[in-house]
Amino acid sequence: MATSSHAISPRKLRSDLYSYSYQNDSNTPLVIAVLASLIERTMARNERIVKNCTWALSKDTRTRVFDCHETPDLTIQSYLERIFRYTRAGPSVYVVAYVYIDRFCQANPEFRINARNVHGLLITTIMAASKYVEDMNYRNSYFARVGGLTTNVMNKLELEFLFSMGFKLHVNVSVFESYCCHLEREVSIGGGYHIEKTLRCAEEIKSRQQEEKRFNQIARVML
């Protein structure tokens, strides 16, 4: 993996997970880029499996509830960044959501993450994780608007998810730590170049936005 001043290292990711600060509003948690890369590779692998084995398509009507009639025109990372921008859910929420996604897939072996169900699964697990981790939360109706869903659909997805999980939402410290380690391995071994490239692009965009913000502030002062 090429070195870069903006590269995500396991140590940098861990520091972000455990000591994230909201003081800088433009600071998107590093875990979002890592999780997006992991989910995208999972989807690519599932597409290959389904292409070669038609029986691999899920026939469980309960998990088909996550299929969107109209998929958002957003990349996985853009969708996660949108959720962060409007909910301000901390990095630990995304780690717990990742735990939930893994548990859900284990509880439903036929379920495979794809372009049709990934957005519904992400907003549902992040909402559930936020309720578990955070002291204060938004209503389901707000998460629905952020995720591009109706409130009724959001409520239905939450119920299906909770019953499918058997309401087993507790994540102890050792489990949380093990998933953090898995995300760190994702940075150091799998897909590191893609994560680094994605973050570098994001940093360039943020830098331009900050320059524009400073310019506008100076212009207002002069006026």
Image (tube, helix red, strand yellow):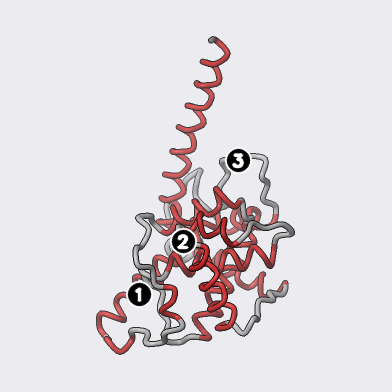
Helix, strand, or loop for circle 3? loop
Q: Which mark is residue 21?
A: none
Tag 1 near tag 2, CB within 8 Å: no
> Disc 1 or 2, which lies upstream in sequence?
1
Residue at the extreme bottom of the image, as rendered: 55
Residue in the image at 44% along x and 73% along y: 66
**Residue 24, position as x, y percentages in the image:** 63, 39
Q: Which mark is residue 149?
A: 2
Q: Quadrant of residue 134?
A: bottom right
**Residue 211, position as x, y percentages in the image:** 49, 27
**Residue 85, position as x, y percentages in the image:** 55, 48
Please state which amino acid type lies under the numbered disc 3: Asp
> Disc 1 or 3, which lies upstream in sequence?
3
* Label 3, residues with CA under 10 Å away: few <14, some 14-19, many ≥20: few
Where 88 sits versus 53, above or below?
above
Q: CA distance from mark 2 to mark 3?
A: 26 Å
**32 and 58: which one is in front?**
58
Residue in the image at 64% along x and 61% along y: 92
Q: CA distance from mark 1 to mark 2?
A: 27 Å
Tag 1 near tag 3, CB within 8 Å: no
- Residue that carries the numbered disc 1 in the rendered image: 45
Residue in the image at 55% along x and 58% along y: 143
Helix, strand, or loop for circle 2? loop
- Residue that carries the numbered disc 3 in the rendered image: 25
Please state which amino acid type lies under the numbered disc 2: Leu
Residue in the image at 55% along x and 66% along y: 183
Where 60 sits versus 115, above or below?
below
